[in-house]
Image: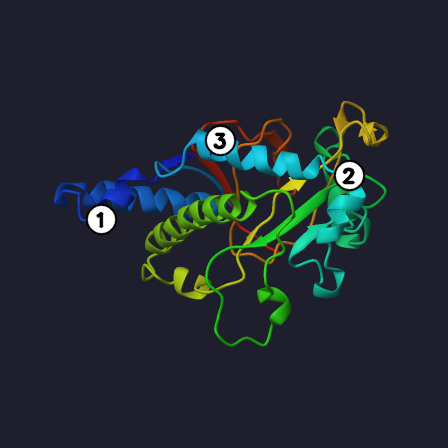
Amino acid sequence: MDLPVVDLAPYLRAAAGDAAPAGEEELRALCATVSASLQDTGALLVMDPRCSAVDNDHFLDVVERYFARSADTKRLQERPHLHYQVGVTPEGVEVPRSLVDKNMQEKIRCMPEEFQPATPKGPDAKWRYMWRVGPRPANTRFKELNSEPVIPEGLPEWKETMDSWGSKMISAIEVVAEMAAIGFGLSKDAFTSLMKEGPHLLAPTGSDLQRHRSRAIGHCMVLFLCHCMPSIQTSTSDARADGLGINDDFVLHEDVPKLDQYFFLYVSTS
């Protein structure tokens, strides 16, 4: 699967009023590329000049220090009564959809053997931290989705780092949403108007690779797999290890490339 890489810079310049009229055709073609990729593959690589590898590295430094803490220390940020919508979700809580969804199990069985994903037999071996980003609605019937953030003790830079990196990711997603709408022939705000004051999540994930060596299946160590995504778009930034791949109904594709300043976006279909 050859995903297009879309540079958001031309669109950002046009939005700021810096683009020449002659560039309108180029912008329309760029928007068409975005909408076509999301429609055909559900995925897209974008480069945002407002983000840097330094920003991403700082974010990773902070979350790595958090996930290196003991399980008992991390559990102080656990909020099961809020359905884990803020704070930390410990390993062993989330269960892969492939364990309970008969239709998905049948799809996997029907795939060519060489493309079938390795499927773990138990719950996820990951910790995930849920951090709300962006403004909340003044009135809401869904308090669990708009609860106050949980801030770990001993990490004074946590809130600023999470808010800053989360805002950058949302900003990129909003631009992609506008470009996709234009590419589909809709009004520019067709998607972003639905995203306003939504329960946007920054959800860094970490696992103890030494502890979970026994989960290796062949040359793969499967830490989590196949979950329902209620989001209109999900964005992933560069990690410090390989392993993020794309799987459609038939083929397990190449790993998503590791590239500075790039976000990998995918659209939920579940």
- For mark 3, does the 10 Å Cα neighbourhood hold few (<14), some (14 to 19), or many (20 or more) residues? few
- For mark 1, does the 10 Å Cα neighbourhood hold few (<14), some (14 to 19), or many (20 or more) residues? few
Q: How many marks?
A: 3
Residue 89 in the image, given as x and y percentages of width and height:
72, 51
Does residue 105 appear to the left or right of 194 in the view shown? right
50 or 102: nearer the viewer = 50
Secondary structure at badge 2 equals loop
In this rendering, does residue 224 appear at all? yes
Q: Which is in the foreground here, disc 3 or disc 1?
A: 1
- What amino acid is at disc 2? Ser
Splitting the image into 4 quarters, where does residue 168 fall? top left
Looking at marks 2 and 1 on the same chain, the residue that comes earlier in the sequence is marked by 1
What whole-number distance in Å separates the C-alpha atoms at marks 2 and 1? 47 Å
Tell me the quadrant of the picture where the C terminus can be found.
Answer: bottom right
Picture residue at 20% right of the left edge, 45% below the top: 24
Q: Are marks 3 and 2 in contact (CB under 8 Å)?
A: no
In this rendering, does residue 91 appear at all? no
Looking at marks 3 and 1 on the same chain, the residue that comes earlier in the sequence is marked by 3
- What amino acid is at disc 3? Asp
Does residue 117 appear to the left or right of 16 in the view shown? right
Q: Which mark is residue 70?
A: 2
Q: Which mark is residue 16?
A: 1
Residue 210 in the image, given as x and y percentages of width and height:
79, 27
Picture residue at 52% right of the left edge, 27% below the top: 258
Looking at marks 3 and 2 on the same chain, the residue that comes earlier in the sequence is marked by 3
Label 3: which residue?
2
What whole-number distance in Å separates the C-alpha atoms at marks 3 and 2? 41 Å
